[in-house]
Image: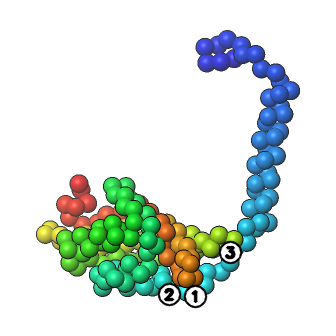
Amino acid sequence: MDSAGSRRDVDMPELWIGRTLATGIAAAGLAVAATGATPEIQPAEGLRAQQIARNAAIATHDRDRLGSVLAEDVSFSSHILHRQGRDAVIETWTGLWTRRPDLQMTFQADRTRASASFNAVAESGTWTERWTETDGLVTLSGTYLTVWSKDKAGQWRIAAETIAPLRCKGGAYCRR
């Protein structure tokens, strides 16, 4: 029956075959994922150094150091902002540092998974930022996902980053 209440012509064996195929494909996908067909590696120490460099660059408002961690074609997104390319992302950070001279922001990874086949790392966790508005201290935090990739020189660079603000504590900024 369709939504109007009339019977549809459905060949039951075809429906059964379709469902069986779909179930088989899904099971095969889970089996590949479970057996690790795409090998995972432990992220290299070079990645940890880049993660530290990112946090240090943001803490010291160092645009050059931050630029050294970003891929040329990096993509950055939040719920209100989308930037493409190293220069655009650095300009965004520079603007934030100008408007919020005491801005401090850190990324704390909860999970980091790396793929040997793709020279890619998925890092996710919590980011927290603090700055002072005219009516007091603001603390904003949420979840982030950073995709790292190795460049031709073998250096880990941020290829994409997305942040989602989930909590805000402070003055009027949090009530807008």
Residue bearing mark 2: 49
In contact (CB < 8 Å): disc 1 and disc 3 = no
Structural distance between the alpha carbons of marks 2 and 1: 6 Å
Earlier in the chain: of badge 2 and badge 3, it is 2
The N terminus: image quadrant: top right
In this rendering, the answer to whether 175 lies above or below 127 is above
In contact (CB < 8 Å): disc 2 and disc 1 = yes
Image point (50%, 87%), residue name: 49
Judge whether residue 17 can be spotted in this image.
yes
Mark 1 surroundings: few (<14), some (14-19) or many (≥20) residues within 10 A: few
Mark 2 surroundings: few (<14), some (14-19) or many (≥20) residues within 10 A: few
Image point (56%, 78%), residue name: 152
Image point (34%, 82%), residue name: 64
Mark 3 surroundings: few (<14), some (14-19) or many (≥20) residues within 10 A: few
- Left/right of residue 4 with respect to residue 38 in the rendered view: left
Residue bearing mark 1: 45
Residue bearing mark 3: 116
In this rendering, the answer to whether 58 lies above or below 18 is below
In this rendering, the answer to whether 148 lies above or below 19 is below
Tell which residue pokes out farthest to the top in this image: 6
